[in-house]
Amino acid sequence: MRNLYNNIYSELGIRPIINCQGQRTMLGGSRLNKDVFQSMEASNMSWALMREVMEKASEYVARHMGVEAAYITSGCAAAMALSAAACISRKNPTYRGILPNSKGMQDEILLQKKQRYSYERAFTSTGGKLIYIGNENSCSKKELENSIGPNTAAIAYLVQSPPDPTILSLEDTVEIGRANDLPVIADAAAQIYPLEYFLKIAQTADLVCFAGKFFGAPNSTGFVCGKKPLVDAVADQGFIAFQTQPDGERAIGRPMKMDRQSIIALVTALKSWLTMNHEDRLLRVDRMLGTIHDELNSVPHIKTQFVTTEFFYGSSTLLVEMDTEALGKTPEDIAIELDQGDPRIWIVLPEGKFYGAEYLHFGAMGTNNFAINAHALEDGEEKIVAERIKAVLSP
């Protein structure tokens, strides 16, 4: 089967990658399992009314996440953008039809300054204006409360694990928001493990946004869940609003279209994630990393270390520390050689060097380190990775 995939890519001049980073949009999101593929094939065989598909699938998500309502979207950023639009337009069909022109509307979205990040663009793409509160080091309850004004539409929050103790917690932010009749939009894209934590985060804020790729759904899926009136306002902005709302053809979410196959795939992937044996999943990751560790252990001038996080996937990462002077190479040199080789392999570098974006979930990395994640590897790929990295590191 791998040869078939490689042939499909090679016809287009594409070099496949063995992915030691993880579920990244840049690498195509996720690897779909057999059940998800089969659900897409089954849904492909029959036509369905998209309103019913969205409503019933979203009801399934809400029921299993323990929330009032949910709405499936074309990724987490889409969930954030539609949530911002919902909080600004507040079910007013006139407002809904002219966004992102938000003149005359409550369109300010508060965000703690220390939480500034690239994906905040999702909040402004549909008409929001970000107002930063606190400073680069901290934010207090009083600073958040004093920032609320007549034009405030919502409070945005980036959920991180472990949480940053120098800023307001999600719980404190929600408490302040509700005391002031302001919804909190939480970006919880990858906060999907442990399962108790996944469900707790989903049930905390008014609108909580997740990315489907992290629990095995297609790259172009996600969902927002939370309070029903607000989720209904999100749905009013969705790509099928023309079927369900007066003047719905002017809904700003029309470019965020989804197909029925992807919607069903998200439901299947979520069901699998909530019911799978995660202990077996973690043991599989540890086994593959153990194989790589054992192979690299004989390479001079490096040290390897297993780093485990409670959150994200809950799985281990293999951290490789290089004596760059003795080896005459940097982690970026290693990454370039692996990228240019056959097979092509992508590892994790500090500060996103070479790959263009940081992708670390276990804390800071030193500049002489690189890391290997295994939760996106297919069985057998760990041996290829071990041999290739050993060859590149060896004199």
Image (spheres, rainbow, N blue to C red):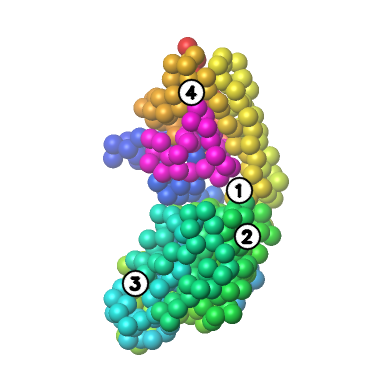
- Bin the neighbour count of mark 2 within 10 Å (Cα to Cα): few under 14, some 14-19, many 20 and up: some
Which residue has dot 3 on it?
A: 127
* Residue 57 percent coordinates (x, y): 52, 71
- Say left or right for 317 vs 95: right
- Bin the neighbour count of mark 1 within 10 Å (Cα to Cα): few under 14, some 14-19, many 20 and up: many
- Res 109 seen here: yes
The residue nearer to you, when weighing 336 against 388, is: 336
The residue nearer to you, when weighing 279 against 34, is: 279
Task: Tell me how far mark 1 sits from mark 3, CA to CA.
Answer: 34 Å
* Amino acid under disc 4: Arg
Task: Tell me how far mark 2 sits from mark 1, CA to CA.
Answer: 11 Å
Mark 2 or mark 4, which is nearer to you?
A: 2
- Residue 239 in which image quadrant: bottom left
* Amino acid under disc 3: Gly
Q: Are marks 2 and 1 in contact (CB under 8 Å)?
A: no
Mark 4 or mark 3, which is nearer to you?
A: 3
Instruction: Give whichever of discs 1 and 4 has the lower sequence position.
Output: 1
Q: Is residue 308 above or below residue 220?
A: above
Secondary structure category for the residue under label 2: helix
Which residue has dot 4 on it?
A: 388
Instruction: Give whichever of discs 4 and 3 has the lower sequence position.
Output: 3
Which residue has dot 1 on it?
A: 313
Question: For the point 54% across and 50% down, which residue is it?
Answer: 34
Secondary structure category for the residue under label 3: loop
Residue range of the region highlighted in magenta in the rendering? 347-375
Task: Tell me how far mark 1 sits from mark 4, CA to CA.
Answer: 25 Å
- Confirm whether the magenta stretch covers residue 356: yes
